[in-house]
């Protein structure tokens, strides 16, 4: 009994020791220049604990005794770290002044070189879109997000960066979309599945403006858009929102076709958490959009799950998987009824309900022990199907398996090499396209050298071969190079050259169907596209009193050959030989684009006001050239605009935040002749020709949003898009949304 | 600096090797190598080169320039190969639609093309066209 008492007493005292063996760290974080307290500074310390400072910049945390590393982070400030030894019942006070940092100039990106790198040290132009940039503005569709980025235009799902691409009726893409570096396009139509990109669980979107095929292969002819999944921090984060909205009447009252309001609604949930050595990310999004156009609506659900495990026994070994999946039931808009009173009504001959599903399973394993070597093995198994309940002959199933091995090796302190191999195996089962098997193999390597501390140079080479139905195209070698020189503390000069190419999609080669009165003819002989882009640029950090930010100016030139278009004409049927009227893919466009782009971001904190001004202006001169004479023809490229501007102002004050964005684009310079020629224009798009002559003038758009923090967790916001109710058009006959209002209740905890 | 020089040399070699000029194909050389004179212009097997004929405007000479421009009878416009160089597509402002013709024969002494022109009133009964040319 006596021994039992001693044991219990000992255990209790041990337990008590555990309880009391804690100390307190408290203090205040302030701006080193202005001495103003900083609210919302993230503190991360041992044992995955974390907190943030209150409105007075104060914090107080309890922690186990012992050695403690505490880091302090706030956007716009240089991070700080303190090392302390905490003893039992100690109270340590840490008052720390954070130094202002140039906004975003040191942010880490991965897409440009497939390794982590500061954005200022890149040799190419890159835009980075942060989650907060689109959450507050009620943007839930990746296509809308990208379309509102300076220098980019998305026409009916087809993205064009700096005028590098036109519009080819939704088939094929010269911009490659990726999720965490893995391509996410449909193997049949070769287009981007925008609706399945999980915006609700994205850390940032990185956009490379220029040919990127050396690192990313076919389809990166004009650039890439990499959606990077968010990693959990030591503090679990749960976010959600529920939103509903309504479309206003269009400016042209003759176009109103509805009797009941046109609503849209969206709910979203995401959660990020570390569980032991495993990172968990989960997100769900549900959308119901009744649409502002007749016979053009969508119901969508998507879900993503990410698990990443850090092996405890083998340091540097990380493995896991991502799953992205979605289902949609929608009616796409193809042709309007007429310009007079049917511009927002789809011509019934082209109406078609389509059900689409998408599943991508991405296992990965990465090993990085010493920092000198890093091995990455990644894979994407993707299944997508398209079902037309009425036009079953257009159904299609597409399967693909992409895998990539990449090795990073730091040869010396001033030199590293990234090399890898990749394959993409695809299988299409379709009446629409026919059944096809594809195989794409590639090897790439890239050398990065830093001969002197402020100079970085990069050169890369890719060799790729594409096979379709066991017939191989010729092996394509392509090259890129670039240089970045830090001329001053916050001044970075860059120059780059990169080649690109794109293999035609299955749809461009084999699609054969009838849409209303229009036929689509196959062309199995359509050839790959190729081109290159080059640029020189300067990125300048700005730090002046309470204002900081950066400005970026680039001059660019790009040239592409054999771009695929869909000219309207009389073509012989491949089976009967009898000609009919319709569209057929062909290598038509030889394009050159000269231009410059200015982008800036400025941030100022004054008292409790935090204001950010961002913007960009892009000028392009897009012109055809003759491949034989090598001279420009002075004919403008189709579906390009010379000028585009975006200016966005965001400010927050206490519990309120406010945002206003202005977009301006000049007129479309040229379009396909089929929409202008008197023999064809009325039968394809009734009334379009007169509309084009009168209304192709460019446009201004204004979006606004206001939010209020109800509690520390809940936020209520209202957004109005197209405040001025501007009437504007994307591709011919595609009238864009009129003014619409939405209200959103969101939470973060 | 030695490393830098080496890198530039390697980069230069890679760049020069990746820039290969497109070579001209045999059909391209044959088509652009002559001024072609119309020989027979048939619509549904009947001569259509007369004053009221459907193909009267193709009567005369045709020249396919290497830069993609050319003249084809009275038409002035552009031409290009399509469908793995088995078709010639002629575009001019005078024709409502580009004319896609199938190459039936192309040698240094003969050019024969065929096409069918859609009949908008009766799609099942198009007009079958055959045009032959000889070097001038």
Image: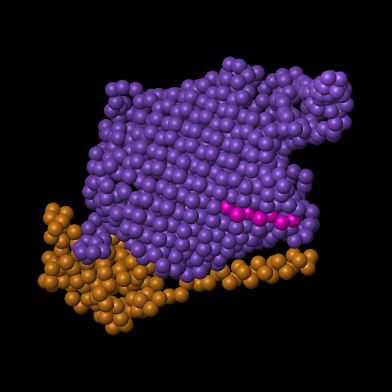
Dominant SS of magenta comes to: strand
Is A78 above or below relative to B86? above
Chain that is orange in the image: B
Question: Which quarter of the rendered picture does the N terminus of chain A lie within?
Answer: top right
Is A236 above or below relative to A204? above
Point 35% across, 69% down: residue: B84
Horizontal side, residue A153 vs residue A81: left or right: left
In the rendered image, residue A357, in percent from the top left (x then y), is placed at 40, 43
Q: Quadrant of residue A469?
A: bottom left
What's the magenta region? A372-378
Inspect this view and state whether residue A331 appears: yes
In the rendered image, residue A426, in percent from the top left (x then y), is placed at 44, 57
Please check the rendered image and state whether residue A401 is part of the magenta-colored stretch, yes or no.
no
Point 65% across, 35% down: residue: A274
Point 72% across, 33% down: residue: A48
Horizontal side, residue A517 vs residue A504: left or right: left
In the rendered image, residue A543, in percent from the top left (x then y), is placed at 74, 36
Chain that is purple in the image: A
Q: Quadrant of residue A29?
A: top right
Horizontal side, residue A482 vs residue A570: left or right: right
Inspect this view and state whether residue A592 appears: no
Pick the front one: A119 or A50: A50
Pick the front one: A14 or A581: A14
């Amino acid at each position: 009994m006596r021994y039992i008492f001693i044991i219990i007493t000992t255990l209790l005292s041990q337990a008590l020791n555990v309880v009391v063996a804690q100390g307190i760290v408290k203090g205040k974080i302030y701006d080193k220049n202005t001495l103003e307290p900083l609210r919302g500074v993230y503190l991360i310390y041992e044992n995955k604990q974390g907190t943030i400072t209150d409105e007075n910049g104060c914090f107080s945390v309890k922690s186990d005794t012992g050695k403690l590393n505490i880091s302090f982070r706030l956007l716009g400030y240089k991070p700080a770290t303190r090392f302390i030894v905490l003893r039992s019942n100690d109270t340590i006070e840490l008052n720390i002044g954070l130094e202002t940092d140039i906004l975003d100039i040191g942010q880490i990106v991965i897409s440009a070189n497939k390794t982590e790198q500061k954005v200022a040290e890149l040799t190419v132009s890159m835009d980075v879109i942060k989650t907060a940039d689109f959450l507050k503005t009620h943007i839930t569709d990746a296509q809308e997000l990208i379309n509102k980025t300076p220098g980019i235009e998305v026409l009916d799902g087809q993205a064009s960066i700096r005028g590098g691409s036109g519009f080819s009726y939704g088939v094929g893409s010269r911009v490659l979309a990726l999720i965490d570096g893995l391509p996410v396009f449909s193997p049949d139509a070769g287009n981007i599945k925008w609706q399945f990109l999980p915006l609700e669980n994205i850390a940032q979107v990185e956009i490379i403006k220029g040919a990127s095929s050396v690192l990313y292969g076919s389809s990166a002819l004009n650039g890439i858009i990499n959606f990077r999944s968010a990693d959990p921090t030591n503090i679990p984060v749960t976010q959600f929102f529920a939103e509903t909205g309504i479309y206003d009447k269009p400016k042209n009252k003759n176009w109103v076709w509805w009797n009941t309001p046109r609503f849209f609604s969206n709910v979203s949930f995401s959660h990020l958490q570390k569980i032991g050595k495993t990172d968990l990310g989960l997100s769900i999004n549900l959308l119901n959009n009744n649409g502002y156009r007749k016979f053009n609506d969508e119901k969508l659900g998507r879900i993503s799950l990410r698990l990443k495990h850090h092996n405890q026994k083998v340091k540097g070994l990380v493995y896991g998987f991502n799953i992205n999946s979605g289902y949609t039931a929608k009616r796409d808009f193809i042709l309007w009824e007429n310009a007079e009173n049917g511009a927002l009504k789809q011509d019934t001959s082209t109406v078609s309900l389509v059900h689409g599903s998408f599943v991508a399973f991405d296992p990965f394993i990465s090993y990085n022990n010493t920092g000198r070597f890093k091995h990455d093995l990644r894979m994407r198994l993707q299944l997508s199907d398209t079902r037309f309940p009425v036009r079953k002959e257009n159904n299609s199933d597409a399967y693909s398996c992409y895998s990539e091995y990449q090795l990073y090796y730091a040869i010396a302190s001033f030199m590293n090499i990234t090399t890898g191999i990749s394959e993409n195996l695809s299988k299409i089962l379709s009446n629409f396209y026919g059944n096809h098997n594809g195989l794409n193999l590639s090897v790439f390597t890239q050398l990065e050298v830093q001969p002197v501390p402020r100079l970085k140079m990069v050169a890369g080479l890719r060799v790729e071969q594409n096979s379709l139905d066991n017939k191989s195209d010729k092996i394509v070698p392509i090259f890129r190079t670039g240089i970045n020189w830090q001329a001053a503390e916050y001044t970075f000069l860059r120059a780059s050259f990169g080649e690109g190419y794109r293999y035609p999609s299955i749809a461009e080669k084999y699609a054969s169907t009838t849409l209303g009165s229009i036929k689509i003819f196959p062309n199995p002989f359509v050839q790959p596209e190729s081109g290159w882009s080059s640029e020189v640029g300067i990125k300048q950090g700005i730090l002046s009193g309470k204002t900081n930010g950066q400005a970026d100016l680039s001059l660019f030139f790009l040239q592409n050959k054999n771009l695929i278009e869909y000219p309207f004409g009389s073509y012989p049927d491949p089976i009967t030989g009898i000609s009919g009227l319709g569209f057929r893919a062909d290598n038509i466009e030889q394009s050159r684009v000269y231009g410059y782009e200015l982008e800036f971001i400025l941030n100022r904190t004054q008292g409790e006001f935090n204001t950010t001004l961002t913007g960009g202006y892009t000028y392009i001169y897009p012109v055809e050239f003759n491949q034989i004479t090598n001279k420009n023809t002075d004919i403008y490229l189709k579906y390009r605009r010379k000028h585009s501007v975006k200016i966005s102002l965001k400010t927050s004050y206490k519990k309120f935040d406010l945002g206003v964005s202005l977009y301006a684009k000049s007129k479309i310079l040229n379009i396909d002749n089929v929409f202008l020629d008197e023999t064809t224009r009325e039968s394809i798009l009734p009334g379009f020709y007169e509309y084009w002559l009168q209304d192709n003038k460019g446009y201004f758009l204004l979006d606004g949003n206001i939010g209020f923090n109800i509690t520390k967790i809940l936020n209520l916001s209202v957004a109005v898009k197209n405040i001025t109710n501007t009437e504007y058009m994307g591709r011919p006959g595609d009238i864009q949304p009129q003014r619409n209002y939405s209200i959103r209740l969101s939470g973060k905890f | 600096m030695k490393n830098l020089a080496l890198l530039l040399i390697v980069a230069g070699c890679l760049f020069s090797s990746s820039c290969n000029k497109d070579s001209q194909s045999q059909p391209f050389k044959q088509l652009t190598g002559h001024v072609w004179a119309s020989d027979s212009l048939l619509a549904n097997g009947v001569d259509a080169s007369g004053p009221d004929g459907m193909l009267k405007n193709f009567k005369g000479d045709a020249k396919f320039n290497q830069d993609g421009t050319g003249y084809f009878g009275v038409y002035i416009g552009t031409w290009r190969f399509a469908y793995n160089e088995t078709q010639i597509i002629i575009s001019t402002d005078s024709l409502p639609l580009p004319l896609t013709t199938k190459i039936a024969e192309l040698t240094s002494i003969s050019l024969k093309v065929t096409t069918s022109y859609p009949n908008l009133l009766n799609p099942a009964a198009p007009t079958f066209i055959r045009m032959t040319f000889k070097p001038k």
